[in-house]
Image (cartoon, grey):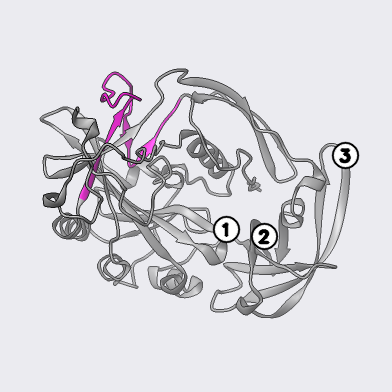
Amino acid sequence: MNNKDLLKAIGDIDEKYLIETNDMEETNRIMPNKKVNIMKKLKYILAPVCIVFIAVIGFYKSGIFHSKPDIIISKKDNWIIKEVEIDNNNLTDTETAVVPKWNEMSISQQFYEVEYNDNKYSSRITKISNDNILKNIGTATLKGYDTYTKITYNKKAELYSIKNVEEKCAIAIKFEGDTDYYVYVNSYYRPTTLGEFMRDLNLEEITSFGTIYYNYWNEDSQENINVEFYGVDNKIIWQKLFTNKNLENIYSDNDIGKYTSEKITQSISISVDIPLLGYKNISVSLTDKGYLLTNILDTGKGFYIGEDKVQEFLNYIKENYDGYKIVYVDENGIEITNRNLETENNTEEGKIMVTENTVNGYVTKEIETDKMTSNENKTEPYIPNN
C-alpha cells in the first residue's frame, strides 16, 4: 500500500482520526477552468468599461466556492495540501463556440438589451421571482436579430423596479404574452462612494461571499503559491472591508496598473455570488497597494481602504481559518513542475487565438488554449461597447 491508498482526512475532521481503507471514493477532480476564464475575459473586454483585470479573478480555481474540499492530502509549510489533477496530455485544443439558433434561445437572450430613463440595460439571462418585483415603471419595445435568417424582431414588454434595488442599477422585464420576469442590469452604473454602492444595490442583503484566494511569491522556492480559504464568516468580510462608507469610487478600468505594484508580491480575491441578479463567482479583489476592486454589475468599481486594512484582513484569515495550498498533479498523483502555471492576482492565463463574430447578443469565437473540461455554456452574452 502506497501513500495514495491512505485515507485523506475530510476537511473538518481532525488529523488524529486518520484511518486506512482500501475502499475509497475517487478523489474529486477539480479542474482549473481556463476556457471559461477566457470567455469571461472576452465578455468584459467588450463591456462599456473594460474590467479584464478583475473580471476573471476567482474563476480558474477549483470550482468549490462554499465548502472545504473532500480530500486533505497532507500538510506543508503550515498549509494543507490540496491536489488538483490536470490532464497533461493533449494540452491544447481548438474549439468553436456556436451561436444558438433563434428558437434555441430564451426570450431574454433573443431580446438582450433595453433602454429606460436614459440608461441602457443588458440581460442577465436570469429569472426573478414575483416576490422581488416592486412596481411597474413603464413599457418598452425591444429588438432582436436572428443572424441565421437575417430577420429583426420586435417585442413589447413591461418594465418593473426590483425591491430594494435602485432602478439605475437594475430592472426587471416581463415580455408580452409571458408570465416570467427577467433581470436586466445597467453596466454603465458608477457609484460615487462605497456607501452609495452598497445602498443602491442593497449589497449586504443580496451578496454572499465564498472562497478566499490568496496568492503570493515564495522567495525560497521561487514560485507562486496559491492558497484557498473556505467557510469564512460573511459578517467578518463586511466588517473588515466595507465599514468606511465614505470611500470614493476612484477606479479607472483604463489604468489597471495604478492599483497594484509593478511586481505583485501577494494578492487576495473573494468569490462573490449575487443570485438575485444572476451573478455567480465574480469577485472582490484586494491589491497590494491597498485597493478594494470589484466587477459587480460588470464594470470596475474601486475604493482605497489602505494597505494596513488589507494586511489586517489577511492576517485575520490566516490566523482563524485553514489554508489549502493548491498543488497540480497528473493522473498518477505526481506533482507537475514543468508546466507554466503562473498566476497573477488569482488569474490564470492561457494561449489565446480568437476569431470573433457578434450576433444575437452572443460572441462566436475560435480559441486555441489549454484544453479543459467544463460544464458551463461556451457561448457568453455580449455586452455592446457603445
Neighbor class of circle 2 (other Cα within 10 Å; few <14, some 14-19, many 20+) is some
Mark 1 or 3, nearer chain start: 3
**Three-letter amino acid code at disc 3?**
Lys
SS for tag 1?
loop
Q: Is residue 257 left or right of residue 120?
A: left
Q: At 43% across and 18% down in the image, what residue appears? A: 89
Q: Is residue 212 above or below residue 341?
A: below
Determine which residue is flagged by label 2: 120
Report which quarter residue 364 is drawn in.
top right
**Three-letter amino acid code at disc 1?**
Tyr
* Main secondary structure of the magenta stretch: loop
SS for tag 2?
strand
Q: At 43% across and 71% down in the image, what residue appears? A: 198
**Three-letter amino acid code at disc 2?**
Lys
**Viewport quadrant of the N terminus:** top left
Mark 2 or 1, nearer chain start: 2
Give the numbered dot on residue 188.
1
Q: Is residue 105 left or right of residue 12?
A: right
Mark 2 or 3, nearer chain start: 2
Neighbor class of circle 1 (other Cα within 10 Å; few <14, some 14-19, many 20+) is some
Frontmost residue, 99 versus 328: 328
Give the numbered dot on residue 20.
none
Residue 220's x, y, as percent?
10, 30
Determine which residue is flagged by label 3: 150
Per the image, is 326 magenta?
Answer: yes
What segment is highlighted magenta in the picture?
A: 323-350
Does residue 242 appear in this view?
no
Per the image, is 346 magenta?
Answer: yes
CB contact under 8 Å: marks 2 and 1 = yes
SS for tag 3?
loop
Residue 326's x, y, as percent?
27, 38
